[in-house]
């Protein structure tokens, strides 16, 4: 750590600036890998030096830079240096008023850094610049290690919420996202709600104080509930997998123990067999040596007997030698027989032992095969869960580390807040009074503005309702007029059609009468012809003239038939045209009906928009009332603390006055 301080001092001096004493003190007191520079006004040179040194420091896992008033250049230099860090887990940049450059630098940090798991960005202004916040969201989508992100009070609007929704669709590690006290609104809430089904890791999303309607909040809470249920089931599966892995490990250990015991017994039996075989071989060798010795003794005796046979009688010596030889041969035969029997017994025992060992070995092999099959089945069951076990172990370690980090961070924040309150209470009496007055004035003005806005909205709502009534009345009147016109047109068409049909029927009757007259004339002419046939020779000329007349009449009749067919076709064409006009009028009536339906839909949309606007205003009013209540509670708490402090000071002054020596030496009045 001394080397870190020396490097920091050297870099600051190289850049032409003096190192900050507060930073040196914090570097000297660096506890357990945590660098806390909260409420320290860091210069650009300090940020540059820290950005160069922190990636090389392998002990710093937590970096707290809350309320440090970082400039845009300083924040950019520091975050650029942290991109190469591999050990940093927690980064706190609360209350630094980061803007466009800071948002872009944070986007690069999230895209390049592979170690940060928790990032706090509360009380900044990242959402005021749409392009820069889009860059930040792109980095969040590409990040693969971040698990907690705090974006409270960052002025994020509905466009920023849409960018966040796109980032959440691509992110696969973020688990907790805090978006309280922003400006997300209805559109942003819906965008975030629509992205949740495609995200499987996020299980906590806070949207309080964002003017989001209640149904969207309930939908988000329901989705988070499903995510938490999925997480609990995953943890249960992890626990079950852990138990199964322990059981499999226990079975493996038992199997290995049984196999080792079996191998030990086999080795012992083999050693015993080797010992017995070596003992039998040694015994056989000893017997063979004894036989060899006996043979040598016998040879020596033979030689001695041969040497002494010359002095003795041949018969007696031969008989004695034969008796000795017979006894020696008998002894040798008995010894060889005993040795052969013992060898056979030992071989039988060895064969029995070997067969027993082979049976035990086969049984052990069968048991081993059964155990191997069971182990293979368990391994097949466990293989599909080993990756999940590894991931869940990593998540468990990360969550435990995060919980420890949070506990330590909470304790340190509590101590820091206590010190900050103690320091600020001495200098903030007049500032608090002014702030209270300013806040009350601001709240009164905002309340008046909201009341005026509500009145304007009420007036707009009344005007819209009046206009809706007028439009409905106009639509009803137009609909009634159109229906009356349609009925009149239908009646008129029916009358015209009836008149034309009557006219055509009259024409047909006239034509039929003319045809009947022509037929009667034809009959008369035929009768005349029949009568004239008797006078054929005399009336030939008259018959020819009558025939010509008949042909002319037939031509006239055919012409009249053609005229009747043409008139009927013309009437049909006129009827078709009339039907076409009626269909056009019906289409116009349908268009009027569709227009009326469109007006009704537009009125419904306007009414729903008005209701949503009223809901938004009501949520804004509720949030303002909540802020006012929190401010009033804080003012009451500050007043109580000031009263306690005044009482403590009064008691201290009284105690000092009562215990001072001046009071004892002063003369009585």
Image: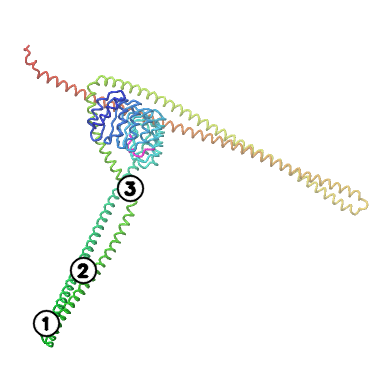
In the rendering, at what x and y percent does residue 424 appear?
A: 24, 23
Please give the name of the residue rendered at 12% of the width and 19% of the height, measured from the top-left corner: 656
| Numbered range of the magenta stretch | 142-149
Q: Earlier in the sequence, mark 3 or mark 1?
A: 1
Residue for badge 2: 277
Q: Nearer the viewer, residue 616 or 376?
A: 376
- Front of the two marks 3 and 2: 2
Q: Residue at x 32, y 49 (%)?
A: 386
Depth check, mark 3 against mark 1: the one in front is 1
Image quarter of residue 620: top left
Question: Disc 3 versus disc 2: distance between alpha carbons?
Answer: 56 Å
Secondary structure, mark 1, is helix
Q: Earlier in the sequence, mark 3 or mark 2?
A: 2
Q: Residue furthest bottom?
A: 315
Residue holding disc 1:
308
Q: In which quadrant will I find the N terminus?
A: top left
Mark 3 residue element: helix
Give the distance between the C-alpha atoms of the residues marked 2 and 1, in whole angstroms: 45 Å
Colouring convention used in this rendered image of the protein: rainbow
């Amino acid at each position: 750590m001394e080397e870190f301080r020396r490097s920091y001092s050297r870099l600051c001096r190289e850049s032409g600036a003096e190192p900050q004493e507060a930073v040196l003190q914090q570097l000297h007191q660096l506890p357990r890998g945590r660098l806390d520079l909260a409420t320290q006004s860091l210069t650009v040179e300090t940020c540059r030096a820290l950005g160069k040194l922190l990636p090389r420091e392998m002990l710093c896992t937590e970096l707290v830079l809350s309320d440090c008033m970082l400039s845009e250049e300083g924040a950019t230099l520091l975050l650029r240096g942290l991109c190469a860090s591999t050990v940093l887990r927690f980064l706190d940049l609360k209350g630094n008023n980061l803007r466009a450059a800071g948002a872009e630098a944070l986007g690069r940090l999230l895209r390049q850094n592979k170690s940060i798991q928790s990032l706090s960005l509360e009380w900044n202004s990242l959402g005021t610049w749409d392009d820069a916040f889009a860059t930040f969201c792109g980095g969040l989508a590409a990040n693969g290690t971040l698990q907690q992100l705090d974006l409270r009070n960052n002025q994020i609007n509905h466009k920023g919420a849409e960018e966040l929704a796109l980032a959440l669709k691509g992110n696969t590690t973020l688990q907790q996202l805090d978006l309280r006290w922003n400006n997300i609104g209805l559109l942003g809430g819906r965008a975030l709600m629509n992205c949740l089904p495609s995200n499987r890791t996020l299980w906590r999303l806070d949207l309080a104080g964002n003017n989001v309607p209640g149904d969207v909040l309930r939908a988000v809470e329901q989705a988070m509930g499903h995510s938490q249920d999925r997480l609990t089931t995953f943890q249960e599966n992890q626990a079950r997998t852990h138990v199964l892995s322990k059981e499999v490990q226990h079975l493996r250990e038992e199997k290995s123990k049984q196999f080792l015991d079996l191998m030990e017994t086999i080795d012992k039996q083999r050693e015993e067999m080797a010992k017995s075989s070596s003992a039998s071989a040694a015994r056989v060798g000893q017997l063979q040596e004894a036989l060899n010795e006996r043979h040598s003794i016998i040879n020596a005796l033979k030689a001695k007997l041969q040497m002494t046979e010359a002095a003795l009688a041949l018969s007696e010596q031969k008989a004695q030698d034969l008796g000795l030889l017979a006894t020696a041969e008998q002894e040798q035969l008995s010894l060889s027989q005993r040795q052969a029997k013992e060898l056979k017994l030992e071989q039988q025992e060895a064969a029995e032992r070997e067969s027993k060992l082979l049976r035990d070995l086969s049984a052990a092999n069968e048991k081993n095969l059964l155990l191997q099959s069971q182990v293979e089945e368990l391994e097949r069951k466990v293989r599909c869960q080993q990756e999940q076990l590894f991931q869940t172990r990593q998540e468990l370690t990360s969550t435990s580390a995060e919980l420890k980090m949070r506990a330590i961070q909470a304790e340190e924040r509590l101590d820091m807040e206590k010190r900050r309150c103690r320091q600020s209470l001495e200098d903030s009496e007049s500032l608090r009074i002014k702030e209270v007055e300013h806040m009350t004035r601001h709240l009164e003005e905002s309340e008046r503005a909201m009341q005026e806005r509500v009145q304007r909205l009420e007036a707009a709502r009344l005007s819209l309702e009046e206009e809706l009534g007028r439009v409905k009345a106009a639509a009803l009147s137009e609909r009634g007029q159109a229906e009356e016109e349609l009925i009149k047109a239908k009646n008129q068409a029916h009358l015209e059609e009836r008149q034309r049909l009557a006219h055509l029927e009259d024409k047909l009757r006239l034509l039929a009468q003319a045809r009947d007259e022509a037929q009667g004339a034809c009959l008369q002419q035929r009768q005349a012809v029949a009568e004239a046939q008797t006078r054929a020779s005399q009336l030939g000329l008259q018959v020819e003239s009558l025939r010509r007349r008949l042909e002319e009449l037939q031509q006239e009749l055919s012409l009249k038939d053609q005229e009747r067919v043409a008139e009927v076709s013309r009437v049909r064409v006129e009827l078709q045209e009339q039907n076409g006009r009626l269909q056009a009028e019906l289409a116009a009536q349908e268009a009027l009906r569709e227009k009326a339906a469109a007006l009704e839909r537009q009125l419904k949309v306007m009414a729903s928009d008005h209701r949503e606007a009223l809901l938004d205003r009501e949520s804004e009013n509720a949030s303002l009332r909540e802020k006012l209540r929190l401010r009033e509670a804080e003012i009451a708490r500050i007043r109580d603390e000031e009263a306690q402090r005044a009482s403590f000071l009064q008691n201290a002054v009284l105690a000092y006055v009562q215990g001072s020596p001046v009071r004892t030496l002063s003369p009585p009045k």
